[in-house]
Image (cartoon, grey):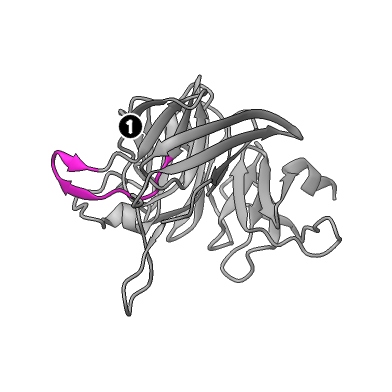
Amino acid sequence: MAFNVGPDGATYLVVALKPLDYQTEQPGWAGFAKTVPEAPQQYRVVALSGSQTVLDVLIEGERFNIHDVQPLPNELLLVCARSHYKGPDDFEKNGRVYTREGRYAREILLGDGIQSVQATSSGVIWTSYFDEGVFGNYGWQSPVGAAGLVAWDSAGNKLYEFEPRDGLDSICDCYALNVESDEDVWLYYYTDFPLVRLRHRAIASVWTMPLDGCGAFAVTAEHSLFRGGYRDQDTYHLFSLGLGGKPELLATLELQDQNGGKLVAGRVVGRGDAIHLVSEGILYRVDVQAALAG
């Protein structure tokens, strides 16, 4: 139900152990995400570092449907991407914090319409939002994620909200987030799809990317590797970032799976200098240096 990468590069997976109750179906309408199932769910959270299992914990009695996961110092954060607002003192706190032994610790509000979550090694939680989280739905007239990108402490206090400057547009939908470290955070968002680097929570650099609709990217100081776009989600684009905000396309790549065919990923996360993928139950990782080498 969730696939993400922690600040140490470990891969985190959340598996539901009971029948799913994640969607509400309405006749004549599409399905809608359900925040709370009819019965509490049981989850298994597994973290892998290479081929080594570094965490394997059972979460019992969780009353929210879980879509994302991140490690915090000595804790685990499970996240439901949606949150209903019913009144000033009546809203769903969709950040679910547990000990590393699986004991419930507390709940925090992270807002509705969460696109992705990445935490730093010091426990700062970064949440990005898709359009419903920015403009409001599920009862939110003043959405928590109106800025499109927010940083929190582990107690749920806001530390930062994105503010565009120097000709940048506001975030309408944050397509991709990459929290490289406590100091450096990168984002890529609709409508103009700039690549923005935050340094100490301030805009440090901006590049005008010649790609739209990408869902994940990896970065180093001088290069970036973007996955996909509106026209082909499983093609990869390697750029030299250079100076002046004008990236140079170095190569367009197609990854191969273990059988030599085109790698088609079901889940993708960009974190630091690598893109992590799941395809047919197999984990893959490609980093910028590997792309440069080949």
At x 30%, y 37%, the residue is 109
Relative to 81, residue 99 above or below: above
Between 40 and 138, the residue placed more toward the observer is 40
Question: Is 106 on the left-hand or right-hand side of 267?
Answer: left
Relative to 155, residue 209 above or below: below
Q: Please identify the residue farthest to the bottom as the structure is shown.
A: 28
At x 44%, y 25%, the residue is 103
Between 117 and 212, the residue placed more toward the observer is 117
From this viewpoint, is residue 205 visible?
Answer: no
Question: Is 177 on the left-hand or right-hand side of 221?
Answer: left
From this viewpoint, is residue 110 visible?
Answer: yes
Relative to 261, residue 119 above or below: above
At x 39%, y 45%, the residue is 80
How many residues crowd around disc 1 within 10 Å: few (fewer than 14), some, or many (20 or more)? some
Q: How many marks?
A: 1
Q: Position of residue 32 (x, y in %)?
A: 36, 63
Between 30 and 158, the residue placed more toward the observer is 30
- Is 194 a magenta residue? no
Q: Which residues are magenta?
A: 79-91
Question: Is 280 on the left-hand or right-hand side of 67?
Answer: right
At x 32%, y 77%, the residue is 27
Disc 1 marks which amino acid? Glu
Q: Position of residue 11 (x, y in %)?
A: 64, 37
Q: Position of residue 286 (x, y in %)?
A: 74, 46
Between 110 and 272, the residue placed more toward the observer is 110
- Is 83 a magenta residue? yes
In the picture of the structure, the residue carrying the numbered disc 1 is 107
Q: Quadrant of residue 180?
A: top right
**Label 1: which secondary element:** strand
Q: Position of residue 37 (x, y in %)?
A: 36, 51
